[in-house]
Image (cartoon, rainbow, N blue to C red):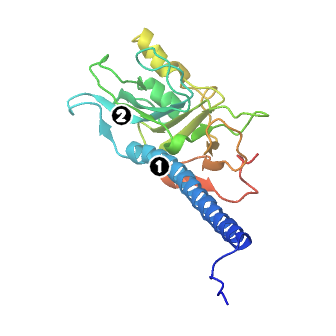
Amino acid sequence: MKRRLGGFTIIEVTLFLGITGLLFLGVTIGVQSSVFSQRFNDSTQSFVEFLRNIYAETTNVQSADDGRSNQVIYGKLVTFGETTGLDGVSIPSGTAFVYDVVGDMGRDVGSGDVLTALYNANADVVVKDTRKLAGIVESYKPKWSAEIQSVGCGATDCSNISAALLVVRHPRSGTVYTFVMKNNTIQVNNKLHHTSGAILTSFLNSTNFKSDSIDFCINPEGSKRYKNRADVRINKNARNSSAVEVINDQGTNNCKL
């Protein structure tokens, strides 16, 4: 009598491969989801630290050059939505630029409104040696191809935010103030490319810059419509970095779609 050799039937092999494939697919999806979530958090926290650093640098009084000048750096201007670089060439969307706000030191500017005081101190954006000064210009772009967007969003695509943020100290009191320009920006790079005249001075008024809160929406999928955008908010009357926060409460998240 012949003994039947042990083995698996075709049905058993098919079931084994099917179950193994499902397990592998589940693990792969879980890993991809975890990586996506981590990158999203990295993009959000990186932007938060970027904004908080603006306050840290504004709080400390800085000389505009080697210390022998009567000019001082009063704070920072951050622009969102500029279209061209210093060389006049188009730049990638979603790039933020940071400029030093430089003005006269020791001038009798008055103790009133900070925007008027900065105007009286001849405060302006300086990123090249035009007034015997050499300010700094920096650029920032979110990590992992995320984009900084506005609260409003189109039916299919979201647009990059167009705004400006002015974080400055009062020339007399030294108190830090935050002003925002919504739905518009200052094309500093383009102006510097074509002229060496005053750039910020004409914007230093309450018509352009207002004391208000502002929400920056971080979209992990770039220009695609993504409903779970992070809301990074700078609260009204911000004086320091503690005013920058991530809104986790879905009820007050202005970036959800």
Which residue of the protein is positioned furthest toward the front in this rendering?
1
For mark 1, give the secondary structure.
helix
Residue 148 in view (yes/no): yes
Q: Which residue is mark 2?
A: 73
Q: Which residue is mark 1?
A: 52
Q: Quadrant of the N terminus?
A: bottom right
For mark 2, give the secondary structure.
strand
Q: Are there few (<14), some (14-19), or many (20+) residues within 10 Å of tag 2?
A: many
Q: Is residue 15 left or right of residue 55?
A: right
Q: In the image, residue 15 lies at what x, y percent?
A: 71, 70
- Quick check: 123 above or below 60? above
Residue at the (66%, 84%) spot, across then down: 4
Q: Quadrant of residue 54?
A: top left
Q: Quadrant of residue 23?
A: bottom right
Q: In the image, residue 145 lies at what x, y percent?
A: 54, 40
Which badge, 2 or 1, comes first in the chain's sequence?
A: 1
- Quick check: 246 above or below 170? below
Q: Camera-side residue: 187 or 61? A: 187
